[in-house]
Amino acid sequence: MNWKSLVNRAARIGVREGLRYLRQSQSKKNSGGSSQPTDARRQDSARSGGGGTASAGSADRATGGQGGSGSQGGSGSYPGDFMRSLKVSYSPDLDGDADPGEVVWGWVPFEEDYSQGKDRPSLVVGRDGKWVLALMLTSKDHIPGGVGEVREDRHAKWMNIGSGDWDSQGRPSELRLDRIIRLDPDSIRREGAIMPRDVFDRVAKHISG
């Protein structure tokens, strides 16, 4: 074998070995690169799963399991509006208790969702166990006419009761006759005023059974 043949053979071996080394190196690189992101994704997933559980627990603790829709009346504690017959007597006495004939401020549940409500003035008309029975007031003008005028507006029945100390701006008020609400005594934050006897008697004629 002459020197030219040896050179050619050495060149072929070198090329062959070089290609094999290149393929092995490339294979190792690809194998290592694919496993690392997989491990990283597993770690990230584990961290994410743990964090999600903690977050849900924190949210439950923050809302007390109530879904964040609670209210001063207590979600689920309202037994419903008073539907039975009622004997009404006028006996206001600003002694710190809510008595018939007084206008008080307290938490009134919404008719469509008892778990929600707002603080508003209401006329006390009686008691039902621990609950104070009342009719809610509003300064919105649902009906025209003078004091004692009664009309129905959509699904509600309203009476004009004029103005009084229960409204700091002296605006004429109306009272809803067809919904007797229960007020939690603990939700009543103050006595507002005493409704005049003649106006109260007009109200009583519509709700007494």
Image: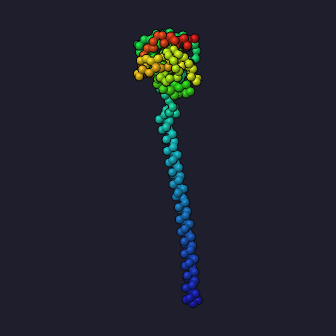
Q: Residue at x 51, y 51 (%)?
A: 44
Q: Where is residue 134 in the image (x, y as percent from the top left)?
A: 50, 17
Using the image as rendered, state which of residue 130 and residue 123 is in the foreground. Answer: 123
Q: Which residue is drawn at 54% across and 72% down?
A: 21
Q: Where is residue 150 in the image (x, y as percent from the top left)?
A: 54, 17
Q: Can you say whether 206 is above or below 16 in the image?
A: above
Q: Where is residue 176 in the image (x, y as percent from the top left)?
A: 53, 19
- Quadrant where the N terminus sits is bottom right
Image label count: 0
Q: Can you say whether 204 is above or below 152 in the image?
A: above
Q: Residue at x 49, y 37 (%)?
A: 59
Q: Can you say whether 15 is above or below 44 in the image?
A: below
Q: Can residue 142 be seen in this view?
A: yes
Q: Where is residue 208 in the image (x, y as percent from the top left)?
A: 55, 11
Q: Which residue is drawn at 53% across and 21% down?
A: 143
Q: Which residue lies furthest to the front in this view?
A: 145
Using the image as rendered, state which of residue 174 and residue 125 is in the foreground. Answer: 174
- Quadrant where the C terminus sits is top right
Using the image as rendered, state which of residue 115 and residue 119 is in the foreground. Answer: 119
Using the image as rendered, state which of residue 141 and residue 77 is in the foreground. Answer: 141
Residue 150 located left or right of residue 172: right
- Quarter of the image for residue 92 reads top left
- What colour scheme governs how the chains and residues are painted in the rendered image of this protein? rainbow
